[in-house]
Image (cartoon, rainbow, N blue to C red):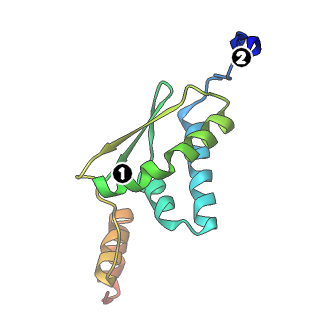
C-alpha cells in the first residue's frame, strides 16, 4: 500500500530547438511530399505541394484552397509535424493551416489551356506560332 503513494520523479526532457531557415524547412517539406507520393498517397502529396508554405518564426503557415482539403491535411499533420521536428532538430515547430479560397492551382487540361500556360511562361512561343502559322 505504501508503494502506491511513492512520489514519481519527472525527468526534464530537453527537446532540441535548433534554428533553421525557410529553405531548409521547404526542402524537408518537399521530401516528405515525395515520400507520400512514392507510397501512393497522392492526395496528401498534392495538398503538400499545392503551394509553398511560409515560415513565421517556428510556425509553418500552409494555405489550402478549401475546408475539405484542410480536413484531409489535418489527418496527416501529426505525422508531418513529427517528421519536420526530427529532420530540422526543432521541437518548437507548429503548423498553421489557412483556408484561402482564392488559391487557384493552375492546371492545364485542354491543348489550348496547355498552350496558354506555356505562353505565360515564355511569350516568345506566340511569336513562333504566328511566324510558322501553327495550330494549337
Q: At 60% from the left edge and 52% from the top edge, which residue is drawn?
A: 32
Extreme residue in the front direction = 1
Packing grade of label 1 (10 A; few <14, some 14-19, many >=20) is some
Query: Which one is nearer the viewer's eye here, 89 or 15?
Result: 15
Residue 110 in view in this figure? yes
Image spot of residue 42 (x, y percent): 51, 67
Q: Secondary structure at mark 2?
A: helix
Query: Which one is nearer the viewer's eye here, 126 or 52?
Result: 52
Q: In the figure, is residue 46 to the left or right of 88?
A: left
Image spot of residue 23 (x, y percent): 56, 38
Quadrant showing the C terminus: bottom left
Extreme residue in the right direction = 3
Q: Is residue 42 above or below residue 32?
A: below
Image spot of residue 94 (x, y percent): 49, 32
The quadrant in which residue 39 appears is: bottom right
Query: Which one is nearer the viewer's eye here, 100 or 26?
Result: 100
Q: Identify the mark nearer the N-term, 2 or 1.
A: 2
Q: Are marks 2 and 1 in contact (CB under 8 Å)?
A: no
Find the distance from the CA under tag 2 to the CA under tag 1.
Answer: 45 Å
Quadrant showing the N terminus: top right
- Residue matched to label 2: 4
Q: At 33% from the left edge and 89% from the top edge, which residue is drawn?
A: 134
- The disc at residue 70 is 1
Image spot of residue 76 (x, y percent): 50, 51
Amino acid at each position: 500500500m505504501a508503494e502506491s503513494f511513492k512520489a514519481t520523479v519527472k525527468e526534464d526532457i530537453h527537446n532540441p530547438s535548433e534554428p533553421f531557415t525557410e529553405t531548409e524547412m521547404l526542402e524537408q517539406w518537399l521530401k516528405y511530399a515525395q515520400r507520400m507520393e512514392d507510397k501512393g498517397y497522392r492526395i496528401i502529396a498534392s495538398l503538400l505541394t499545392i503551394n509553398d508554405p511560409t515560415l513565421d518564426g517556428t510556425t509553418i503557415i500552409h494555405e489550402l484552397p478549401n475546408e475539405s482539403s484542410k480536413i484531409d491535411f489535418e489527418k496527416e499533420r501529426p505525422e508531418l509535424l513529427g517528421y519536420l521536428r526530427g529532420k530540422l532538430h526543432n521541437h518548437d515547430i507548429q503548423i498553421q493551416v489557412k483556408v484561402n479560397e482564392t488559391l487557384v492551382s493552375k492546371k492545364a487540361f485542354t491543348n489550348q489551356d496547355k498552350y496558354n500556360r506555356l505562353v505565360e511562361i515564355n511569350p516568345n512561343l506566340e511569336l513562333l506560332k504566328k511566324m510558322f502559322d501553327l495550330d494549337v
